[in-house]
Image (spheres, rainbow, N blue to C red):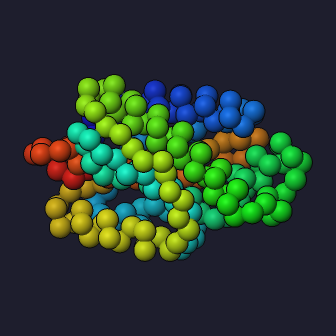
Amino acid sequence: MKALQDAWSPTVRKVSIALSELFGMEIYVKPDPLQTVKPEEMIELLELDSSTVISAVSKISGDFNGYLLLLISPEYANELLDIIFQHYLENDVIDLSSDIKADIVKEVANIVVGNLVSEICNVTSKKVSYTIPEVVYDFLSALIDVICIDLAMKRCDATMIKMRVIMRNEELPVRLLILMAEQGGQGVEACSCV
């Protein structure tokens, strides 16, 4: 948890700058404090408005293993995409293919995950790599239940970050779940999650 706390502040700055440059408008990422949660409480504490979510899932490997999941409700994902496409194309997102929508969500997740993994490596001096995020549209419970059961069996907690992406005075809630285990480690940080 300490490594994530140390890595999170520079990550937020870098993500805000990268997203602003990518989309050509001021974008701010406003995080709530990091929160350690029991696996069985995770779905309730996510406070998403929808039972279905769009999730970008990235696998972490190296000195730490696990997953990073960026979750957003379909309603807020469409708002995010509408803002971006109205800015660039003066066009509604409804006219776009689902592949284009998925690519944009994937790129946003790639920026968040890449910056976070880089900062974790800087803070811990560990070697960690990640996969390009895969975008999945599914029921929240289908995405989370398997992970929660695995964590509960190992008696480990997960780290959840609630953050809001602010663009053009619109505030869009996003959740980031961090589920990592240090290779061959012991103790809380090394158990199954940081």
In the image, is 60 to the left or to the right of 80? left
Instruction: Residue 85 in the image: state x and y as whole percent.
Output: 80, 49
Considering every residue shown, the one lying at the far right of the view is 90
In the rendered image, the quadrant that contains the C terminus is top left
Is the N terminus in the top left, top right, bottom left or bottom right quadrant?
A: top left
Is residue 86 rendered to the left or right of residue 184?
right
Q: Image quadrant of residue 126?
A: top left
Q: Report the side of 38 relative to 110 (left or right).
A: left
In the image, residue 13 sits, relative to residue 49, either above or below, namely above
Residue 181 in the figure: left or right of residue 112: left
**Percent of width and height locating residue 145:** 35, 71
Q: What residue is shown at x 32% (from left), y 30% (from top)?
A: 121
Seen in the picture, residue 96 relative to 62 is either above or below; the reply is below
Q: Is residue 38 above or below residue 28?
A: below
Q: Nearer the viewer, residue 148 or 59?
A: 59
Quadrant of residue 158 in the image?
bottom left
Q: Is residue 19 visible?
A: yes
Query: Dividing the picture into quarters, in which one does residue 118 lie?
Result: top left
- Identify the residue at horizontal 28%, vertical 60% (top origin): 38
- What residue do we see at 68% from left, 30% from top? 21
- How many discs appear? 0
Q: Residue 40, can we see it?
A: no
Nearest to the observer: residue 67 or residue 149: 67
Q: Nearer the viewer, residue 131 or 1?
A: 131
* Residue in the foreground of this view, choosing between 61 and 182: 61
Residue in view at x 34 percent, y 25 percent: 122
